[in-house]
Image (cartoon, rainbow, N blue to C red):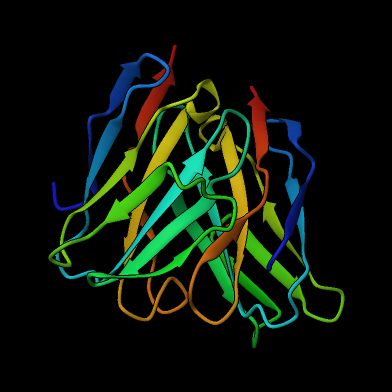
Amino acid sequence: DTGVSQNPRHKITKRGQNVTFRCDPISEHNRLYWYRQTLGQGPEFLTYFQNEAQLEKSRLLSDRFSAERPKGSFSTLEIQRTEQGDSAMYLCASSLAGGPSTGELFFGEGSRLTVL
Amino acid sequence: GENVEQHPSTLSVQEGDSAVIKCTYSDSASNYFPWYKQELGKRPQLIIDIRSNVGEKKDQRIAVTLNKTAKHFSLHITETQPEDSAVYFCAAIAAGNKLTFGGGTRVLVKP
């Protein structure tokens, strides 16, 4: 499968624990995005990278969230000191260098986080 | 920033009838408007898109219209089939950076 790959697909954790999600984008895609989706809602933008550079973070993003893309390939999203409100599906997406308006934004299957 | 509103939140139609979903956006600089379909437990997938220099685009049973003056765009599905049942999301983008999504419309096609 040469699509966007995310793991783990499902993570259950206790409040206060740290979790990390990994995203492997389509190999030739320079842009990588993280979105969060709660039940019944549309995907909410978190952050995006152009190669290894993090170009934008949502103002709504808590400082407990950090994302990296160290070599411009895969990316990780870490959530520290998880809270129950962090429970959601975390979606990764990738596109060509010009962004979604120049080429389709492809989504991964998502990583579902459940915080108990 | 961009704000996208989507209506209705749920839509139930009889198989063979048409379905229409409407979205409005706030940023007049937005120039690209895709629609995504998300089946239960699956990833969102692009089904059609439209750019700001076009007023209408059609692909088989689906079509999208755009009114830049009014800042709204719509998805039209004709001759609906059970496999059209899913959640549909509209989105808008300005300056080529990030997509802002609407809240979604759950479409149920009744056989």
Quadrant of the rendered image containing residue B92: bottom right
Pick the front one: A108 or B105? A108
Q: For the point 55% across and 82% down, which residue is it?
A: B95
Q: For the point 37% across and 81% down, which residue is it?
A: A98
Q: Is residue B108 left or right of residue A19?
A: right
Which residue is the extreme one toward the right? B70
Pick the quarter of the image with the C terminus of chain B: top right
State whether residue B72 is above or below residue B94: above
State whether residue B68 is above or below residue A106: below
Pick the front one: A99 or A19? A19
Coordinates of residue A59 in the picture (x, y in percent)? 58, 58
Q: For the point 55% across and 26% down, which residue is it?
A: A85
State whether residue B106 is above or below residue A3: above
Quadrant of the rendered image containing residue A9: top left
Pick the quarter of the image with the N terminus of chain B: bottom right
Pick the front one: A54 or A25? A54
Q: For the point 54% across and 60% down, which residue is it?
A: B60
Coordinates of residue B53 in the picture (x, y in percent)? 64, 88
The image shows a total of numbered marks equal to 0
Coordinates of residue A13 in the picture (x, y in percent)? 34, 16
State whether residue B61 is above or below residue B31: above
Q: Is residue B110 left or right of residue A25?
A: right
Pick the front one: A18 or B52? A18
Coordinates of residue B47 in the picture (x, y in percent)? 49, 56
